[in-house]
Amino acid sequence: MWKILLEEFIGDLKIQKLRAFLTMFAITWGTIAVVLLLAFGEGLKVAIINGLMNAGDRIFMVYGGETSKIFEGLPTGRRIRLTEDDLDLLRRSIQEIEFGSPSYGRWGTSLKWGDSRTTTYMEGVYPEFSELRRMFPAAGGRFINQEDLDRRRRVLFLGNDIAERIFGQTDPIGQTVMLDGLPFTVIGVMQKKFQDSSNNGPDEDRAIIPASTLKTIYGRRYVNHLIVRPREVRRAPFVRQELFRVLGRRYQFDPTDERALFMWDFIEDTKMVTAIGLGIQIFLGLVGSFTLLVAGVGVANIMYVVVRERTKEIGVKLAVGARRVHIMAQFIFEALLIALTGGGAGLAFSGLVVVLVNAIPTDNPAMTYLANPILSWPIALTCVSILVLIGLAAGILPARRAAAVDPVESLRYE
């Protein structure tokens, strides 16, 4: 049966080449619109999320604030200043914390290597900082480790941009850099990453040393902030609440006093950015879907014309014993084949466009958002599903009309 339907479809194409081409082209164009809009929408969403998470991967940045509520007779306006010991207390008290690191920051740190000089923002941190801030070392280097921390080693991890400014084409690993007049050995350089959020400047332009080394050299007591990551994102609200409770007990402030601690909540920011990205993607998908729907209406109209032109042929088939289900199958099959053939061509063309666009260099931050389409399986399956629905919708009504033709009347049809 399917072979017969296919032969009839091919025969009809040969007779009505222009009509068939225009119909398939409409479906192809609609498919291209849907696929590319969804792909660019997905790429935009991923770029926005990665830009945020490359600054902080599911973390809380906790800063000391100022009390705004009276607590157990203590006045408002008391300044809260956090220390490294607070992180130890938090990790002992809150089992849901997976990683943590203090951050001792220092602006205006001078770096000198040979004739190259520059200044930058420096941080003293724990080894976990690499995971928390996605500052992963490029090949051949490493991040600071626990032994560096324990021995207060003078080791230095550099952002990729500042490393290039200082060393140019020279391999930085193992080189000795004068940091504020003291010799430090470069142990690693950060992998290049896209980052659209930052605290105290982009990571590509900063220097990292062990927290213990910074404390020893500069005599720092208070941290700039603490960084913690919950083991599970779903437990983040509980961890946030516990941070206020534990530190509130230590520094004697009301756990509900939101101004006692300032907290940069990357988890909530990521949820918000994801929702915005999904909204953009849905909007773009709807625009493309309406384009494809218009093409589907065109297929339905063509099928109605086909039914009218082949009324006598349908009547003859019914008169010699063809069942109505066979007549319906013929037109539904033709509508589906037109939709899937045009859609297949559209998917292939869209895939080629995605590959070519992804080959464009994205050094420009704007291009990271725009020239980053992602053609994923969900997008492809969604488009195929839409095409099948359009083919069915465009074929069922004309097929029902064809199957309802009266054999006697159809033979007299002009």
Image (cartoon, rainbow, N blue to C red):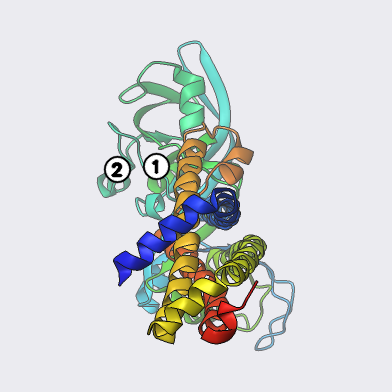
Q: Callout 1: few (<14), some (14-19), or many (20+) C-alpha neighbours within 10 Å?
A: many
* Residue at the image point whose x is 30% and y is 24% from the top: 174
Q: Is residue 96 above or below residue 169?
A: below
Q: Callout 2: few (<14), some (14-19), or many (20+) C-alpha neighbours within 10 Å?
A: some
Q: Which residue is mark 1?
A: 213
Q: Which residue is mark 2?
A: 148
Q: Is residue 362 above or below residue 61?
A: above
CA–CA distance in space, label 1 to label 2: 9 Å
Residue 60 position in % (x across, y down): 52, 65
Check disc 1 and report its element: helix, strand or loop. Answer: helix
Residue 366's quadrant in the figure?
top right
| Mark in the foreground, 1 or 2 | 2
Q: Which of 48 and 162 lies nearest the eye of the viewer? A: 48
Residue 157's quadrant in the figure?
top left
Residue 187 position in % (x across, y down): 32, 32
Residue 385 numbered mark, or none: none
Q: Is residue 107 above or below residue 20?
A: above
**Amino acid marked by disc 1:** Thr
Task: Answer with left or right where residue 51 lies relative to residue 124.
Answer: right
Residue 275 position in % (x across, y down): 60, 68
